Structures are given as C-alpha cells and as structure tokens.
Amino acid sequence: MPHIIVEYSPSLDDQMPTLLENLHNTLAEAGVDKGRIKTRGIAVDHNVVGTVGSKGLMLHATLLLLEGRDVATKKSYATPLHNLMKRTAPEDCAVTLEVRDMVNDTYYL
C-alpha cells in the first residue's frame, strides 16, 4: 500500500489537486498497482526555507513503501515523482523527496 504524502507551502494550494493526481498516476506508470496507492497533500502553515526564511516556498514528498524493495526499484519510483515536482513547482521553490520503508510487521491493512 504505497503512500505519497506531499507537504507544501500554502501559496501552492491552487496547484495541489492537479499535482497530487499527476503524482498518483506517475507512480502507477512506474509500475505500482494504482488501486493500492494513497496520495495526499498537507499544507504547512509555518515553515522556514533556507536563507529565504519564512517567505520561502517548499514542496516535499515522502514516498512510503512496504519494506523489501531494492534501491534501484525505489529510485525507479522516486525519480519520476521528483522530476514531476520540479517541473511543476515555481522556480524559487525548494523541492525534495524522500523514500521510506514501512515495516511489514507493523503496517496494518
């Protein structure tokens, strides 16, 4: 049950519905069963970004996957997601993505 969790500056709110849909579809196109993906966005009201400070824009995604995939597979999922985010975000936006493993024994369906 892969999850894409996007945290973002509130000023990016208008583009989130489209970005979330596109991220969801991109992960499916990378080989993940679309019916198992959960994608959501969370506006972060207070953030400080680099040297810009509290006026900086940020877009961060966490891709959660059940443990067991090798690094190459994780990168094959993460790279197109990160590329999409970079293409979509304003030029002055800090864009990052992290892949994390979920432990099978403690993930409940």
Image (cartoon, helix red, strand yellow):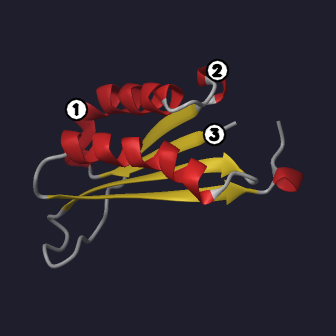
Image disc number at residue 67: none
Q: Earlier in the sequence, mark 1 or mark 3?
A: 3
Could you tell me if residue 107 is visible in this image?
Answer: yes
Residue bearing the label numbered 3: 2
- On-image quarter of the N terminus: top right
In terms of image quadrants, where is residue 35? top right
Amino acid type at circle 1 is: Asp
Residue found 37% across the figure and 27% down from its top: 22
- On-image quarter of the C terminus: top right
Residue found 21% across the figure and 76% down from its top: 50
* Disc 3 to disc 2: CB gap under 8 Å: no
Between 48 and 105, the residue placed more toward the observer is 105
Where is residue 44? Give x, y as percent: 36, 55
Amino acid type at circle 2 is: Gly
Residue bearing the label numbered 1: 14
Residue at mark 3 to residue at mark 2: CA–CA distance:
10 Å
Residue bearing the label numbered 2: 35
Q: Residues within 10 Å of mark 3 (few under 14, many from 20)?
A: many
